Amino acid sequence: MRAPSGYLLAARYRLLEPVGRGGMGTVWRAHDELLDRYVAVKEVRLPAVLDEELRAELCARTEREGRATAMVAHPSVITVFDVVTEDDRPWIVMELLQARSLEQLIQQDGPLQPRRAAEIGRQILGALRAVHAKGILHRDVKPSNVLVTDDRAVLTDFGLAALEGDVSITQAGMVLGSAGYIAPERVLGSKASPAADLWSLGATLYTAVEGRGLHGRRTAAAALAALTSGEPIPMPKAGPLGPVLDALLRIDPQTRLDSVRASLMLARVAAGGSAEEPLASRRGVRPGSVISTPPFSRRPAHRGLHRAEATAAALTGGTVTDTATKAGPVPRQERRPGEGVHRRRVEPRPTLSIYARFKATMIKLCLPRRFWPRELRKRG
C-alpha cells in the first residue's frame, strides 16, 4: 500500500508529491521539517507474496546498502541523508535534484550527440569506480537511474539494487533490473561483478546515443540470444563513441573494457577527440622522436688534436690551416705518456762520474738526510 500525500515519516519528513515511480517503490518530494529543506524520499514497496523472514531480510539489506552508499562521497553518486524503517519497510531519504532522468531526456529530446553521451558516461563511470572501491555493486545501471542536470550526471537507486543477486529472491520469482541492461553473465546465472556494471553502462550509453535499446529485445533471454548470435551490434549514430561501446558490450567479462581504460576513452570523446587517439599527441611529443645523449667520457674528443695539427704543419712547412686544407684531415696519433695533461716536461738527468757517485754514497751513509746537499735530496 502506497503512503498518502501529506504523510509524516519518522515525525520529520512530510511527503508532498510523487516525482517518480518504479516497480519497487515511489520517490516522493518531501520536506524535512527539522532542517527546513526539501529532500527526496524513496518509499520501498515489497511484494506481498514474500514471507515474513524474507521480508525482514530484504529490509535489512536495503538499510545496509543505503548506509554503504552514504559513505561514498562523489559528485555523481546520489547523496543519502537517512534510512528509516517504518511500517515494516525501509524508506531512503536522499538529496532532491532538479533534473530529468536520462530516459526522459531521450524520450523528450531524442538521441544524444556522441560527445554529450560520452560526458555523461564519463561521470557515471566515475561514480561506479567510487562505489566499486567501497565494495558496492550497483547492479541496476540503466537510463531511468541516471539523473541529468545542466552540468551534472548522477547515479541513483543504490538501495534497490542491493536486493539483486540473492538466491532466495530469485526463487520467489522476483526479477530486478531491466532486461536490456543486464550483463550476459548475470542472465546465465553468474554473480554480479564490477564488469557487469560496466556492461550495463555500455548498454545505457548505447540507448542514449542510438535512441533505442540494445537489439530492441524486451526480455533478457531474447537479448542474450541476439548477443550470442555473433552478429555485429549496429551503431549508425555512435560515431567516435562506437569503439567504447563495442569494448564495453563484449560478452566475455574477461575481455571487456576495464574501468580505467574506459574512463580515458570516454574523456577523449567528450573532449571532441577520438577514443583511440594515442597519448603521445596529447602530450605534445612527436611520435618517433629520439632524444640523443652525449657519450659518457671523461676526456673531450678534441684534447690533443691541436698538437697533431701543429706537428703536421711543422713537417710540411706551412700553417695549420693551410696544411689542413692541402693535406686533408690528419689522422689522430697516439699520445706519448705524460703529453697533453698539463704536466711539466721532465728533463733527463745527467750521467754522474764515478767520483760523484762515490761521494754521494758516502754522504748518504754518514750524514742524516736533512744535512744532504740540495741536489742529492732531489735525487732521493
Image: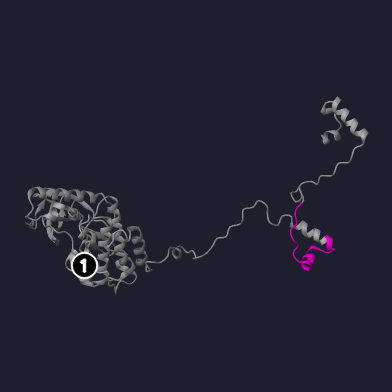
**Left-right relation of 46 to 133:** left
**Residue 37: image location, x then y, percent:** 19, 54
Q: Is residue 75 magenta?
A: no
Disc 1 marks which amino acid? Ala
Q: Which residue is mark 1?
A: 225
Q: SS of the residue at dot 1? A: helix
**Residue 198: image location, x then y, percent:** 28, 60
| Numbered range of the magenta stretch | 314-335
**Left-right relation of 93 to 118:** left
**Left-right relation of 231 to 323:** left
Rendered-image quadrant of the N terminus: bottom left
Which residue is at the far front? 229
**Residue 153: image location, x then y, percent:** 27, 61
**Can see residue 214?**
yes
Query: On screen, 65 above or below 235?
Result: above
Q: Residue at x 74, y 64 (%)?
A: 329
- Marker count (numbered): 1
Q: Residue at x 37, y 65 (%)?
A: 268
Query: On screen, 275 above or below 73?
Result: below
**Left-right relation of 45 to 111:** left
Q: Quadrant of residue 273?
A: bottom left
Foreground of the two, 250 or 59: 250
Foreground of the two, 117 or 237: 237
Which residue is at the far bottom? 236
The crowd level at tag 1 (other Cα within 10 Å; few <14, some 14-19, many 20+) is few
